[in-house]
Image (cartoon, grey):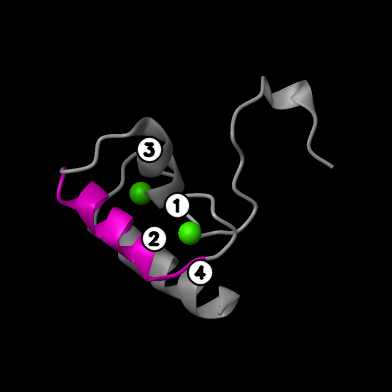
Amino acid sequence: MIDDALGGALVCLIPGDLNCNGAADMNDMIIFIAVLLGMDTKASHIAASDFDADGQANGDDIQGFVDSTLMSN
Ligand SMILES: [Ca+2]
Ligand SMILES: [Ca+2]
């Protein structure tokens, strides 16, 4: 159950669901690629794209995104 313990921050429960619409799909892949290219600097998108939790969204996170997307479909 999600309550206000996180300060009302939007929490995506599905790994790879960068736009928090309930599914990890092509739209999230487009966002992920834009984040990697530095074209999308939205903090929530960068945080959701950082699959290995090193504080950056970069090529090291591609495998995590692919795994998450494949597993959720
Ligand atoms: Ca999504
Ligand atoms: Ca990372």
Q: Which residue is mark 4?
A: 68
Place of residue 39 in the rendered image (x, y in percent of width and height, measured from the top left)? 16, 43
Q: Classify mark 2 as within 8 Å of ligand 1 or not, answering yes or no.
A: yes
Q: Residue at horizontal 76%, vertical 23%?
A: 4
Q: Quote the CA–CA distance across marks 3 and 1.
A: 16 Å
Residue at mark 4 to residue at mark 2: CA–CA distance: 11 Å
Main secondary structure type of the part rendered in magenta: helix
**Mark 3, secondary structure of its residue:** loop
Name the residue carrying label 3: 55
From the viewer's perspective, is the residue at label 4 or at label 2 nearer? Answer: 2
Distance of label 2 from label 1 (alpha carbons) = 5 Å
Which amino acid type corresponds to the residue marked 3 in the rendered image?
Answer: Gly
Which of marks 1 and 4 precedes in the sequence? 1
Q: Are marks 4 and 3 in contact (CB under 8 Å)?
A: no
Residue 33 picture location, percent across and down: 24, 58
- Local packing at callout 1 (Cα closer than 10 Å; few below 14, some 14-19, many 20+) is many
Residue hosting label 2: 28
Mark sitting earlier along the chain (4/3): 3
Magenta range is 24-38
Q: Earlier in the sequence, mark 2 or mark 1?
A: 1
- Measure the alpha-carbon separation of dots 3 and 2: 19 Å
**SS category of the residue bearing label 2:** helix
| Mark sitting earlier along the chain (3/1) | 1
Considering only order in the chain, which callout, 2 or 4, is on the residue closer to the N terminus?
A: 2
Task: Give yes or no for residue 68 being in the magenta stretch.
Answer: no
Whether disc 1's CB lies below 8 Å from ligand 1 is answered yes
Looking at the image, residue 8 sits to the left or right of residue 29; the answer is right
3 or 2: mark nearer the eye:
2
Task: Answer with left or right where residue 70 lies relative to residue 36.
Answer: right
